[in-house]
Image: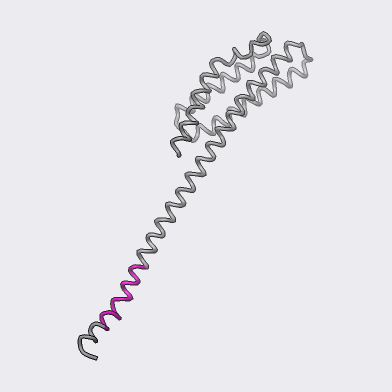
Amino acid sequence: MSDGESKTQRFLITYFPMFIATLSLCTAIFNGYLNMRFVDLIQRNLGRAEYMRTCKEIIDAYFQVKFRAGVINASAARSADAATLARDEMDGANAVNKFAALGTYLANLRDEEIRRQYTALSGELSKAIARAKQTAPGDVGGLFTAADEMFAGLNNDCVKSAQDAM
């Protein structure tokens, strides 16, 4: 073996494993970066899915409150017994409480302004349920005029949040 071949062989034996080790280190760092991005993507997707599920539930809860107000109004109009009317009123209050709980959950994921809006809407729904038995039959929809406007704004916020997340 010549002296030049010997130096080349020593150079390769010394530096080639270092080159392979450096490539392995770079691959491991890049793999860690990709894993971190993947975990972040999954977390954001789960958060968005949870928010959208709760938006769906709060829409259902809102319309349950409106339905319960109609039931209370119908019971009062047909002069139902006190126990039936009390049960219907309790169901209405329970529907408002479910709406308020879901609204609080959604508001915790958003800012203070949204929290105030959900609180105001919950109060408006509570008033509508309380007035449902004194309202003339068929006029229950009028109890929800202000609430409908407030709910439309909050529902638009849910839609906007979903579109921003996509």
Please give the name of the residue rendered at 73% of the width and 10% of the height, measured from the top-left corner.
Answer: 77
The residue most toward the right is 81
Where is residue 79 shown, x and y percent of the image? 77, 11
Quadrant of image for the C terminus:
top left
123 is higher (above) or lower (below) than 7: above
Tell me which corner region of the image, top left, top right, bottom left or bottom right, holds residue 104.
top right
Relative to 21, is 72 on the left or the right?
Answer: right
The residue most toward the bottom is 1
Q: Is residue 15 magenta?
A: yes
Where is residue 157 shown, x and y percent of the image? 47, 29
The residue most toward the top is 136
Q: Which residues are magenta?
A: 9-23
The one of 53 and 1 positioned closer to us in this rendering: 1
Q: Specify the principal SS of the magenta part.
A: helix
Please give the name of the residue rendered at 73% of the width and 12% of the height, measured from the top-left corner.
Answer: 76
Q: Is residue 163 magenta?
A: no
Tell me which corner region of the image, top left, top right, bottom left or bottom right, holds residue 69.
top right
Where is residue 108 shown, x and y percent of the image? 50, 34
Please give the name of the residue rendered at 36% of the width and 66% of the height, measured from the top-left corner.
Answer: 25
Relative to 25, is 114 on the left or the right?
Answer: right
Quadrant of image for the N terminus:
bottom left
163 is higher (above) or lower (below) than 150: below
The one of 47 and 12 positioned closer to us in this rendering: 12
Please give the name of the residue rendered at 26% of the width and 83% of the height, measured from the top-left corner.
Answer: 10
Where is residue 4 shown, x and y percent of the image? 20, 85
